[in-house]
Amino acid sequence: MLRYLPFLLVLALWIYAFIDCLNTPEEQVRRLPKVVWVIIILLFGEVLVGPVAWLVAGKNRTPGRTPGPETPQRWVAPDDNPDFLKSLDKDPKDQKDPKDQKDPNDTKDASDSKDSKDSKENDEKDPDPRPE
């Protein structure tokens, strides 16, 4: 089993370098076009020349900010987030209940509600409208 270890390590490095090259933006590839790097990695992968060359010379690996879009903000835990802590200080009684808010798309007007009140009153006075 131990005799397969070198082969597996070479294969793992080959696959890693290939996927890393494919996922690297074109602006971060150094010295050669990206397509040429892919060909070098594939052709010389078994002898480790291609993957090692890519890892050493093919990609710009300087730490720090990479050119491109603004770096996203770091995630903040709720107990460290000032907005969340402020929301805890608010009194829940001050917040409006969504059921109490009037729907702007509601087509009912005041006359509809008046008619429904009148019909309810009539139902209460005479539960059976048939004559006896």
Image: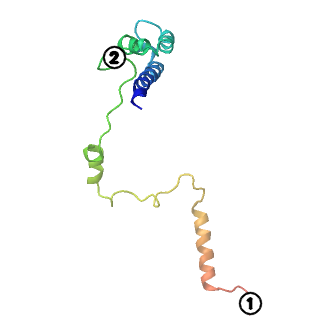
Q: Nearer the viewer, residue 8 or 12?
A: 8
Find residue 53 and report its horizontal and vertical position in percent: 39, 11
Residue 13, above or below 31: below
**Count of number-bearing discs:** 2
Find residue 49 and report its horizontal and vertical position in percent: 42, 11
Local secondary structure at mark 2: loop
Question: Sequence order check: which comes first, mark 2 or mark 1?
Answer: 2
Find residue 42 and report its horizontal and vertical position in percent: 50, 15
Q: Nearer the viewer, residue 112 or 99?
A: 99
Q: What's the CA distance linking mark 2 and mark 1? A: 94 Å
> What residue did someone put label 2 on?
61
Res 95 label? none
Local secondary structure at mark 1: loop
Residue at the spot x=63%, y=80% of the render?
A: 122
Q: Nearer the viewer, residue 22 or 115?
A: 22
> What residue did someone put label 1 on?
131
Residue at the spot x=29%, y=58% of the render?
A: 91
Find residue 45 and report its horizontal and vertical position in percent: 46, 15
Give the image quarter of residue 54.
top left
Q: Nearer the viewer, residue 82 or 54?
A: 54
The amino acid at mark 2 is: Arg
Residue 23, above or below 103: above
Residue sitting farthest toward the bottom: 132
